[in-house]
Image (cartoon, grey):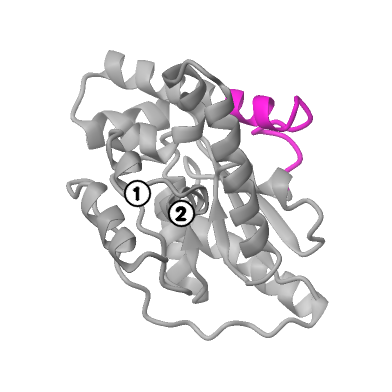
Amino acid sequence: MAPVVIAMARDYGADGHEVGVELSRRLGIPLYDNELLVRASLRLGASVDQLAMYDEQVAAEMMAFLPDRFDARTAADKLFDSLRSVIQDLGFTESCIIEGRLADFILQGNRNMISVLVSAPLADRVNRVKEKRDVDEEKAEKLVKKMQKAREQFYKRYSNGQWKLHSGKDLVVNRGKFSRESCCEIIARAYEAKCAEVGAPLPVPVEVPDVPTQAEPLEGHLHAVDAAQTPAPGATAASGSQIA
């Protein structure tokens, strides 16, 4: 039986990453985010240092920007192929939360996958980015729109136009309407209902390591994984400074 997996898409600035962190703690299952990029780089034989060269926003949505960063688009395509293999390995073998990276499209063959979108009104997302980035409203709005467009283009490009960020989701939660904890609880209840439906045992909640805060750099956490040569199984992914 395929594991019950949550594929979580996020509107930029909707607090989706933070909801994912809380959900991982609530359910006791791992959250995979930047660790997906680390694993993909290891498959390609690339150094994790290459990922750390990017600022936190590009690292968070690195695949959306790669076609513009390299002369040959094939570099981005190869990295996505590796990323897809990592997501398939995880999504068909263990119960977990996979954040972004077109996971709902990649795992559509898993009948026990729950596709989720964490959304919020534009004004809420702009205000959140404004506060976390300490920028004025104009800059915050430009950043939100830029990153949102990148995510939508990523979906379009790597699904060959078959999938959209805002369509085909099993569950959409509005972070502008509900608190982070309430959004987490809504998704957790859906996960538990699906487990009961297919007869899958519920995981036992465990202590999950803290993820980096907004003030902590991504590089140190990526170096820690690189030093070990392989990500620790069952651990929450190192996630960098994100506004997801």
Residue segment shown in magenta:
152-169
> Does residue 74 lie above or below 225 as drawn?
above
Q: Where in the figure is residue 240, as x and y percent of width and height?
A: 30, 49
**The C terminus: image quadrant:** top left
Q: Which of marks 2 and 1 is nearer the N terminus?
A: 2
Residue 195 in sight from this viewpoint: yes
Tell me the residue that label 2 is attached to: 42
Q: Main secondary structure of the magenta part?
A: loop
The reply to whether discs 2 and 1 touch (Cβ–Cβ < 8 Å) is yes
When asked about the image quadrant of residue 141, the answer is top left
State the SS at label 1. Answer: loop
Q: In this view, does 15 lie above or below 39?
A: above
**Quadrant (top left, top right, bottom left, bottom right) of the N terminus:** bottom right
Residue 189 in the image: state x and y as whole percent: 63, 68
In this orientation, does residue 173 appear? Answer: no
* Lateral position of residue 211 relative to residue 165, left or right: left
Q: Secondary structure beneath disc 2?
A: helix
* Residue 43 on image: x %, y %: 52, 53
Question: Hey, which quadrant is residue 231 in on the image?
Answer: bottom left
Q: Residue 48 carries which label?
A: 1
Q: Which of 78 and 197 is in front in this view?
A: 78
